[in-house]
Image: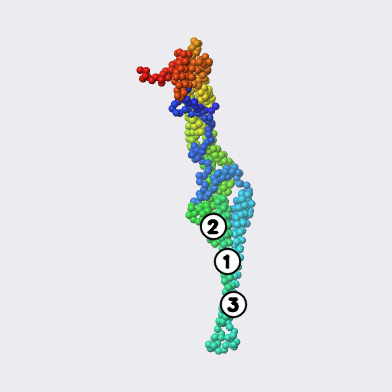
């Protein structure tokens, strides 16, 4: 059965007559009983959890990892956490294929290292890429790198062809220019030359004029041939510029495509592939241009510019990748040390950080399975503890906390313990207060306290004790409900009939006690009047008995027993009641017929001389006809 029990509405019809029970006249009737569901409401998201949402969850507070002063974005933490849990349940990559793959990667890096004896060998490193890409863990990235290198080499070959074409055009231009210069110096007009050889030392003015270059149209610099030569030279220069532009554009485009691949691998934390791509880049393009061609507003550009204040370059990606690889090794070393000391909490955090930075690096991928299983069990219990605290299941929370303290020497239990102690105590105190209110017959306050206790700790074992207490006091609650129902129905006779059942149930409730007292006093007065009327009837004075009941009927018109007694007397006093009714009818007419009314009142008194109602009516009419001052 449900608690609390609320009041039913006391909605009795208001009239000019009094009733057996008159509701309080202070304008406020008891509130109606509204059926309520006393079950705990759905848990609302609180502003803060019992521990302020500060339980370590192996979940970084920020979505970045800082390496070498640069914040590397990790993406969605929920996805990262899910992947970390998957990693903990996977065996280590320690088979022969994995070892061969890492050897191939090391050989590629060694082949294109600037410290290699004899210098980097691009072709040796390039030939090892297909073998490395055959390992499933590589995700075929080495083959993607090989394709990028191949496309870059094709672009370089195409640039070489364009360069050779420019050289051939330049040779052609030089030959044309030489021929044009010779023609300009030696081409002259034949009509001014007699063809005789020049003899002697002195040449006169006439002979010199004949031997001068031709200046007339059609010869020398004025010839069409010379003009065509100049046009061809301009065409060659234009073609050379177009080829140069194509060469530069192709180089920039190829570099940009290659750099996009490098940046993508860096964001994916494939640092070894970034190192290989960076070293191949330096062998493919030796022009010293290593600036990454990325949008200034992109995240990768901001990652460098906002943290380091520099533009990203291939060298910076190489440096950051090396730093990340070193950091992962240090994290794993710290993890091994803490795990050996049974400091599982700190060890799980270090492993989480190592995994977040270098998920695909050897120290993380080759971590023994037994170590990962210890961390997996701890993380699972830690997540379960967090869930129980959010669900306010403190019994289960105590059990998990005790287990975590046993397996992890560094488990931070102080906040958990204090939160569980505070909230369990608050719930227990609320239950005790609810019991006290229930015993004091204040079910409303008891309901408030038990609701508060349930919201604090829904699974409190002491709630069952309270249920048992309510079940044991069910008779009292039922009696109180029945009293409210009968009161709202106006069934006051039934309340009086069950007065010994209701009296203890409503004890302590001032409103109900006042209603009960008023009902019992009025019913006592009614019963006394009925008893007097019965005495009159036994003595044959039916008119007196009827008048005794009619007087009290005016005050309590709704009492059923009073109405029945009057109905039984009605046939015996019909002439008397008829005379009174006629008198009142004439008295209430407009205008009043006082004479007729007085006649009928006198007739009624003649039927029953001791009638108080007849005397009262006669006296009222006389006062109207003969005012008091006229009688003096």
Could you say where residue 39 lies in the image, as x and y percent from the top left? 54, 31
Residue 338 shows up from this direction = no
Could you say where residue 107 lies in the image, as x and y percent from the top left? 60, 54
Q: Looking at the image, is mark 1 or mark 3 earlier in the sequence? A: 3
Q: Where 530 falls versus 139 (above or below)?
A: above
Mark 3 highlights which residue?
Answer: 224
Q: Where 250 falls versus 270 (above or below)?
A: below
Mark 2 highlights which residue?
Answer: 293
**Secondary structure beneath label 1:** helix
Residue 55 shows up from this direction = yes
Q: Where 475 falls versus 47 (above or below)?
A: above
Q: Nearer the viewer, residue 347 or 60?
A: 60
Mark 1 highlights which residue?
Answer: 242
Q: Label for residue 176? A: none
Q: Residues within 10 Å of mark 2 (few under 14, many from 20)?
A: some
Q: Where 567 falls versus 425 (above or below)?
A: above
**Secondary structure beneath label 2:** loop
**Secondary structure beneath label 3:** helix
Q: Which quadrant: the N terminus?
A: top right
Q: Is 230 left or right of 21, judged from the image as shown?
A: right
Q: Which quadrant: the C terminus?
A: top left
Q: Residues within 10 Å of mark 1 (few under 14, many from 20)?
A: some
Q: Nearer the viewer, residue 502 or 284?
A: 502
Q: Looking at the image, is mark 2 or mark 3 earlier in the sequence? A: 3
Label 1, label 3: how far apart the Cα atoms are: 27 Å
Q: How are the residues colored?
A: rainbow
Residue lying at 60% horizontally and 58% vertically, measured from the top left: 149
Which mark's residue is nearer the viewer, 1 or 3? 3
């Amino acid at each position: 059965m449900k608690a609390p029990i609320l009041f039913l509405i006391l909605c009795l019809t208001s009239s000019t007559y009094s009733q057996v029970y008159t509701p309080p006249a202070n304008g406020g009737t008891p509130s109606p009983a509204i059926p309520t569901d006393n079950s705990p409401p759905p848990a609302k998201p609180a502003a803060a959890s019992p521990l302020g949402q500060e339980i370590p969850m192996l979940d970084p507070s920020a979505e970045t990892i800082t390496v070498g002063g640069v914040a590397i974005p990790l993406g969605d933490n929920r996805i990262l956490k899910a992947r970390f849990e998957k990693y903990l349940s996977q065996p280590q990559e320690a088979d022969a294929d994995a070892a061969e793959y890492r050897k191939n990667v090391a050989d590629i890096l060694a082949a294109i290292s600037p410290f290699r004896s004899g210098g980097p060998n691009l072709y040796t490193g390039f030939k090892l890429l297909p073998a490395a890409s055959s390992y499933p863990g590589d995700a075929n990235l080495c083959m993607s790198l090989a394709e990028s290198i191949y496309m870059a080499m094709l672009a370089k070959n195409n640039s070489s062809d364009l360069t050779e074409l420019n050289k051939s055009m330049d040779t052609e231009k030089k030959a044309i220019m030489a021929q044009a210069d010779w023609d300009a110096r030696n081409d002259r007009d034949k009509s001014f030359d007699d063809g005789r050889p020049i003899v002697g030392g002195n040449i006169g003015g006439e002979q010199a004029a004949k031997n001068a270059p031709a200046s007339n149209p059609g010869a020398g610099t004025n010839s069409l041939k010379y003009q065509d030569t100049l046009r061809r030279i301009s065409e060659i220069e234009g073609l050379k510029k177009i080829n140069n532009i194509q060469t530069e554009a192709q180089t920039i485009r190829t570099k940009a495509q290659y750099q996009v691949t490098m940046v993508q691998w860096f964001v994916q934390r494939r640092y070894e592939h970034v190192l290989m791509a960076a070293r191949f880049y330096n062998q493919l393009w030796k022009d010293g241009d290593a600036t990454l061609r990325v949008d200034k507003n992109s995240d990768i550009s901001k990652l460098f510019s906002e943290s380091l204040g520099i533009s990203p370059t291939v060298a910076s990606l190489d440096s950051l990748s090396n730093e990340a690889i070193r950091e992962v090794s240090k994290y794993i070393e710290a993890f091994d040390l803490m795990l050996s000391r049974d400091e599982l909490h700190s060890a799980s955090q270090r492993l989480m950080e190592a995994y977040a930075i270098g998920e695909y690096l050897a120290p993380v991928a080759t971590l023994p399975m037994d170590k990962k299983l210890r961390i997996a069990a701890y993380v699972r219990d830690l997540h379960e503890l967090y869930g129980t605290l959010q669900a306010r299941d403190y019994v289960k929370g105590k059990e998990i906390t005790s287990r975590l303290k046993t397996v992890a020497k560094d488990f931070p239990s102080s906040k958990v313990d204090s939160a569980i102690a505070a909230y369990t105590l608050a719930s227990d105190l609320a239950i005790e207060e609810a019991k006290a209110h229930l015993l004091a017959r204040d079910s409303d306050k008891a309901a408030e306290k038990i609701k508060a206790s349930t919201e604090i700790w829904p699974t409190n074992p002491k709630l069952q004790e309270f249920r048992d207490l309510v079940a044991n006091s069910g008779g009292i609650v039922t009696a109180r409900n029945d009293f409210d129902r009968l009161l709202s129905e106006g069934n006051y006779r039934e309340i009086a009939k069950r007065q010994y059942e209701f009296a203890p149930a409503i004890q302590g409730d001032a409103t109900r006690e006042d209603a009960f007292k008023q009902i019992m006093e009025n019913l006592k007065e009614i019963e006394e009047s009925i008893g007097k009327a019965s005495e009159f009837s036994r003595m044959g004075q039916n008119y007196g008995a009827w008048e005794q009941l009619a007087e009290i009927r005016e005050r309590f018109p709704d009492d059923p027993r009073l109405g029945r007694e009057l109905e039984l007397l009605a046939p015996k006093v019909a002439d008397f009641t008829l005379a009174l009714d006629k008198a009142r009818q004439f008295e209430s007419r407009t205008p009043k017929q006082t004479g007729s009314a007085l006649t009928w009142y006198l007739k009624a008194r003649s039927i029953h001389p001791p009638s108080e109602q007849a005397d009262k009516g006669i006296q009222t009419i006389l006062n109207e006809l003969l005012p008091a001052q006229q009688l003096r």
